[in-house]
Image: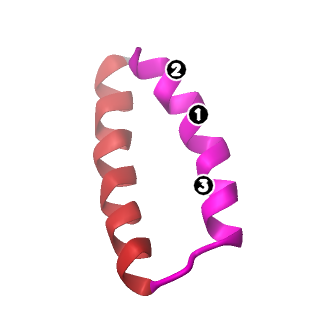
Amino acid sequence: MAPLLCRARGRWDDKNKKSDATERSLRARRQRRAEMNKVCSDSV
């Protein structure tokens, strides 16, 4: 499951860069991405 999320995360990042509506959601997204990175690196 985790490696699949890692691959999906790359596509989401591209989408989010284009449509970063508010700083707050951007900040929350960045935090979520950091957590996801940790999960991904742990699983590899």
Q: CA distance from mark 2 to mark 3?
A: 15 Å
Mark number displayed over residue 16: none
Please give left or right for residue 10 compared with residue 42 in the image: right
Mark seen at residue 13? 3
Q: Residue at x 65, y 68 (%)?
A: 17
For image coordinates 71% across by 70% down, the residue present is: 18
**Magenta span includes 6:** yes
Q: Give SS at disc 1.
A: helix
Helix, strand or loop under label 2 = helix
The secondary structure that dominates the magenta segment is helix
Q: Give SS at disc 3.
A: helix
Earlier sequence position, callout 2 versus callout 3: 2
Amino acid type at circle 2 is: Leu
Kindly identify the amino acid type of the residue bearing the numbered disc 3. Answer: Asp
Residue interval drawn in magenta: 1-22
Q: Kindly indicate the quadrant of the structure image that contains residue 11.
A: top right
Q: Quadrant of the N terminus?
A: top left
Residue drawn where x is 40% and y is 73% of the image: 25
Give me the C-alpha separation between circle 1 and circle 2: 6 Å
Q: In this figure, which residue is indicated by the disc labeled 2?
A: 4
Q: Residues within 10 Å of mark 1 (few under 14, many from 20)?
A: few
Judging depth in this view, the residue of 41 and 23 nearest the camera is 23
Spot the residue most to the bottom: 23
Residue 23 on image: x %, y %:
42, 85
User: Mark 2 and mark 1 in contact (Cβ < 8 Å)?
Assistant: yes
Disc 1 marks a residue whose amino acid type is: Ala
Mark seen at residue 8: 1
The span from disc 1 to disc 3 (Cα, nearest Å) is 9 Å
Q: Residues within 10 Å of mark 3 (few under 14, many from 20)?
A: some
- Return the disc, 1 or 3, that comes first in the chain's sequence: 1
The answer to whether the residues at label 1 and label 3 have Cβ atoms under 8 Å apart is: no
Q: Is residue 29 above or below residue 35?
A: below
